[in-house]
Amino acid sequence: MEKELKLYKSLNRLANADGTVIFGDADDRVIPLAELKETFELQNNYYNRSFSGLSLSNSADLFDQCVAPLCPKDIYLHIGQNDLSLFEKEPSAFDQGYTSLIKHIRNVCKHCSLAIITLRNADNDPLIEQLNKHLAVIAQNEGCELCDIAKQQAWNPRQTKEVVSFLYSMGFVRPLTNKRPVQDVARILFCYNLI
């Protein structure tokens, strides 16, 4: 984790403010942001600040060191995979930890929007299913967008790309450059490899 921390701090010196940040665990570290941004003509600056071993116990500190300096406009929280044992033992402690993290983020980055990404659950694990239900309640209670990627869904990336190209050709470029729907971006970023 120290190596990632050092790398992200160095990259932050090159980054621009008001971008979109992915703050997740080890699986998210390999999201090919450059390719997805180019393929789907995503206009924002996207930064991946995901860590191996990211959990609720270390997330606020890592957020302060690597995400907060970016002054992000949007944050995709994909946290929970490393907290399954905590959730299994004490669901209320998990809920409290996640809610505390959201409050901390909002205190530090007052004008950013938050999207909570559910955990993938292709194998229908009942524990992950319950955790995702808790994430949905937390998102609703805290006014965050919920992006449900739990189940492998039919998604046609070629069709998505064609729709984006059509909108561009019809002159709807400006709305897409301002703000793309959170659900669409989450599907692109977190489900690209489920095709």
Image (cartoon, rainbow, N blue to C red):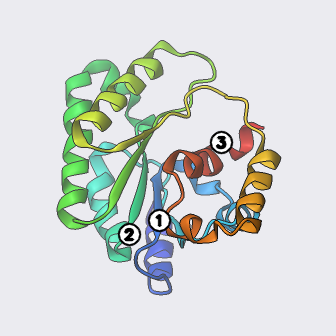
Place of residue 115 in the rendered image (x, y in percent of width and height, measured from the top left): 40, 48
Q: Name the residue located 62 percent from the left edge and 18 percent from the top edge.
A: 123
Q: What element carries label 3?
A: helix
Seen from the viewer's position, the closer of residues 7 and 133 is 133
- Res 144 → quadrant: top left
Mark 2, residue position: 72
Place of residue 125 in the rendered image (x, y in percent of width and height, measured from the top left): 53, 16
- Res 155 → quadrant: top right
Q: Is mark 2 on a helix, strand or loop?
A: loop
Give the answer, above or below, for where 160 lies relative to 73: above
Q: In this view, does 86 lie to the left or right of 126?
A: left
Q: In this view, does 161 lie to the left or right of 189?
A: right
Q: Earlier in the sequence, mark 3 or mark 2?
A: 2
- Res 143 → quadrant: top left
Classify 10 Å Cα crowding around label 3: few (below 14), some (14-19), many (20 and above).
some
Q: In this view, does 2 lie to the left or right of 98?
A: right
Place of residue 44 in the rendered image (x, y in percent of width and height, measured from the top left): 54, 71
Q: Is mark 1 on a helix, strand or loop?
A: strand
Distance in Å between CA atoms under marks 2 and 1? 6 Å
Mark 1, residue position: 20
Q: Do the residues labelled 2 and 1 touch (CB within 8 Å)?
A: yes
Q: Which of marks 2 and 1 is nearer the N terminus?
A: 1
Seen from the viewer's position, the closer of residues 88 and 46 is 46
Q: Name the residue located 55 percent from the left edge and 28 percent from the top edge.
A: 150
Three-letter code, disc 2: Pro
Mark 3, residue position: 191
Three-letter code, disc 3: Cys
Distance in Å between CA atoms under marks 3 and 1? 17 Å
Place of residue 85 in the rendered image (x, y in percent of width and height, measured from the top left): 37, 26
